[in-house]
Image: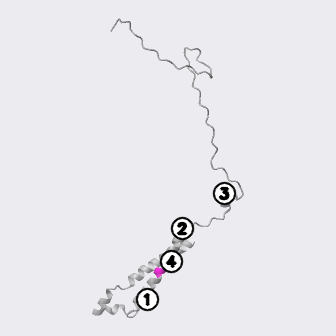
Amino acid sequence: MLHVLLMGVQYLCAFLIVSLVLLQRGKGADAGAGFGAGASGTVFGARGASTALSRATAILAAVFMITSLSLAYTGTHKAPSSNSILDQLSQPAPGAPAAPTAAPALPAPPAPSPAPRGGAEGGGGGSASSPAPPATPTPPARSNGAGP
């Protein structure tokens, strides 16, 4: 709520500062007053307009800076915690032991035994405790010298 109020004051000050700066006469306008163009500044008097507008601009600039610092302060600080029942139930009780954050490590499963090989060695069964011997490659057949 405070943030919204400060933002509204900030926008209002910014708009009023821009308006007041546009209403003020520049430094070069005094040079034209000597040649007969000085009739436009007679509403507030000879110097009354410049001092009143510049003073209002300075005050609004100070308010703008204060609201800017206040907005920066409220933006960096954490909002107060909610007091709803759901928020209180989701937080652990102060005296309760903390729940473990990670599951305990499980032992690795045993390595699977190699599959028994079937074929000409007997009914293809084999016992689970003795694996089948690895197959040895057979050498290529040689010729007896007859032929190429």
Q: Is residue 74 above or below residue 129?
A: below
Residue at x-position 51% and y-position 76%: 67
Q: Gap between marks 2 and 4, in whole Å? A: 16 Å
Q: Which mark is residue 52?
A: 1
**Mark 1, secondary structure of its residue:** helix
Q: Check contact, mark 1 vs mark 4: CB within 8 A.
A: no
Q: Is 111 in front, or is 12? A: 111
The x and y percentages for residue 40 are: 34, 90
- Colour mode? one colour
Q: Magenta segment, which residues?
A: 60-65
Quarter of the figure with residue 95: bottom right
Choose between 105 and 20: the one closer to the eye: 105
Q: Are marks 4 and 3 in contact (CB under 8 Å)?
A: no
> Mark 2: few, some, or many residues within 10 Å (few <14, many ≥20)?
few
The residue where tag 2 is placed is 76
Say which label, 1 or 2, has the lower sequence index: 1
* Three-letter amino acid code at the position of disc 1: Ala
Task: Determine crowd level at label 4: few under 14, some 14-19, many 20+ residues with C-alpha closer than 10 A.
Answer: some
What residue did someone put label 3 on? 90
